Image: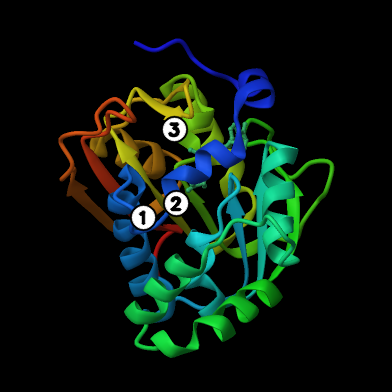
Amino acid sequence: MEEFTGGDVYQKEFNPRSYLEYYKFGEGTLGDETTIFYLECLCKTFALGSMKGDTLIDIGSGPTIYQLISACEAFETIIASDYLDENLQETRKWLKNEPGAFDWSPVVKYVCELEGNRDKWAEKEAKLRRSIKQVLKCNVHLGNPMAPLSLPQVDCVLSSECLEAACSDHESYRTAVKNISSLLKPGGHLVLCGVLETTFYMVGSRKFSSLFLTEKFLREALTANGFTIVQFKTQPRVDKVMLDMCDFTALYFIVACKGTKA
Ligand SMILES: C[S@@+](CC[C@H](N)C(=O)[O-])C[C@H]1O[C@@H](n2cnc3c(N)ncnc32)[C@H](O)[C@@H]1O
């Protein structure tokens, strides 16, 4: 088992620019496989599906916005959040289109293609920039993860690859689900995506621990916190070469409803 890399290690050693290497889309990185799976699921849920609402909070956004590209078709207001100020700065840089901001256009173009509108990628970027109204500090280990802010409950909470990075054991994972659930309206949706049976991932030359998750555990953790699972999709890993970057065996995408689905 890898030594747990908690918040203090993230503060000192998580390098957003090194992490973004995974998102140089189409360059054959391990990120291509994971990103394509997430984007397709997110597109079906938010752009082509029926889920709609006023506000979505993305928890543990990191320095990335790929997870929000289809969401801006379904929600008028998006709040991005992360534990690290450096990640928030990276996102703000992209929002303001500042020099040196990460180039998300290959990913945005891919999503436009999925949504059937490839020519409109520049408009899509502009729409996403307008939709992301706040970029806030969060901590999934706090009863109110957005403390000291107290936000009205929202229609959707999204989180990609965050809880497995932030939690050291199953108990803290269950508690973190409860914490982020407090941000959701009853009947609202929690959308989670990430990696199964993973013990680590690399950010540059630094190894970060990941909590080993199984489908069984995830189903139990959500049900125990009062969620009804609407969708649980998994996909086995295709890449067999880049095991030194991250040892996940499969990807997951979950949609769960807070309470009983009407
Ligand atoms: C693997 S990255 C995922 C980033 C992004 N969501 C993605 O899909 O690429 C894990 C993220 O979890 C964040 N994180 C770690 N501990 C956290 C905590 N206690 N609360 C909230 N976020 C945390 C890290 O700062 C990092 O951005």
Indicate the secondary structure of the residue bearing disc 2.
helix
**Some atom of ligand 1 lies within 8 Å of the CB belonging to the residue at label 2:** yes
Q: Residues within 10 Å of mark 2 (few under 14, many from 20)?
A: many
Of the pair 15 and 154, the residue shown nearer to us: 15
Q: Give the mark toward the camera: 3 or 2.
A: 2
Name the residue that disc number 1 marks. Answer: 35
Label 1 packing within 10 angstroms: few (<14), some (14-19), many (20+)? some
Q: Which mark is residue 225?
A: none
Query: In the rendering, at what x and y percent does residue 185 appear?
Result: 60, 62
* Residue 48 makes an appearance in the image: no
Task: In this rendered view, identify the residue nearer to me: 53 or 115.
Answer: 115
Q: Which residue is mark 2?
A: 23
Q: Position of residue 11 (x, y in %)?
A: 69, 25
Left or right: residue 246 compared with residue 142: left
Query: In 3D space, how far apart are the residues under numbered discs 3 and 1 (Cα atoms)?
Result: 17 Å
| Residue under the point 70% across and 65% down | 95
Dots 2, 1 in contact, CB < 8 A: yes
